[in-house]
Image (cartoon, rainbow, N blue to C red):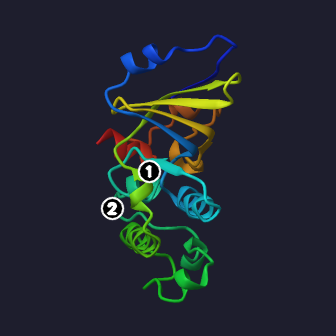
Amino acid sequence: MLIRRRGWDKMSTTEVNRTSNSKNEDLDVIIVGAGFAGFYLLDRLRGMGMTVQVFEAGDGPGGVWYWNCYPGARVDSPGPMYQFSRDDLWRDWKFSELYPSWQEIRAYFHYVDEKLDLSRDIRFNRRVNEAEFDPARNRWTVRSSDGSVTRARYFVLCTGLGAKPYVPALPGLSDFHWGAPSYGALAAARS
C-alpha cells in the first residue's frame, strides 16, 4: 500500500474519474482492517454519528484471524481477553475452551457482526492500493483493488501487529534449517 501526503497541487475530478471503475464516495472515516480494532472503531464512530466504512482484504471478518486458519492455530491468551467488554456482547458469549481455536475466534467475529450489524459498513475483498492526503482539502483519497475511489477526512489503519511477519536479523539465522517457515497470516496468504 502506498501512503503519501499530497502537496498543494490538486488532483482534478477528471483524473479521479478516469482512474475509477465505480462511483466516488465521501465519508468521515475510512478504516482498514475488520479485526478487533476495526470492529471496535466502526461501532464507536457510528455511535458518534460519523459516516464510516471498513475496507477488508478478506471476504469475511476477523482481521488476522480470517487468515490464521492453519491446523492447530489458537489464541495464546485466555479467551476472555479476546472479547469486547460491552455487556450486550460478552454476556451471551462463552468460549468452549480457555484458549480458543481459530474456528471459535471466527465464530465470535460473526456473532459480534450479527449483533452490531457491522457488515453493512464493511467492504470485503477490498484491498487499499494507495492513500493520498490532500492538505488543501483536508481529505484522504483512497484507491482500492476493486477500482473504487473513496475520500474521507480520516484514514485509520487497524491492520494489527500480526498482519506482517517480522524475522529479526540474527547472526546465523540463515544457517538454521527449520523447514518451511509458517508465519500465520503470511503462510495463509502463500497457500
* Picture coordinates of residue 177, whole percent (x, y): 45, 38
**Occupied quadrant, residue 137:** top right
Kind of element beneath mark 1:
loop
Location of mark 2 (residue): 71
**Which amino acid type is shown beneath numbered disc 2?**
Pro
Q: Is residue 171 visible?
A: no
Kind of element beneath mark 2:
loop
Q: Is residue 125 visible?
A: yes
Vertical placement of residue 191 versus 145, above or below: below
Residue at 37%, 72% (x, y): give it: 107
* Picture coordinates of residue 160, whole percent (x, y): 58, 50
Of pointers 2 and 1, the one earlier in the residue sequence: 2
**Which amino acid type is shown beneath numbered disc 1?**
Gly
Location of mark 1 (residue): 184
* Picture coordinates of residue 142, whole percent (x, y): 51, 31
Residue at 48%, 18% (x, y): give it: 13
Q: Is residue 146 left or right of residue 176?
A: left
Residue at 41%, 71% (x, y): give it: 101
- In the picture as drawn, the residue positioned furthest to the bottom comes out as 91
Q: Is residue 5 left or right of residue 118?
A: right
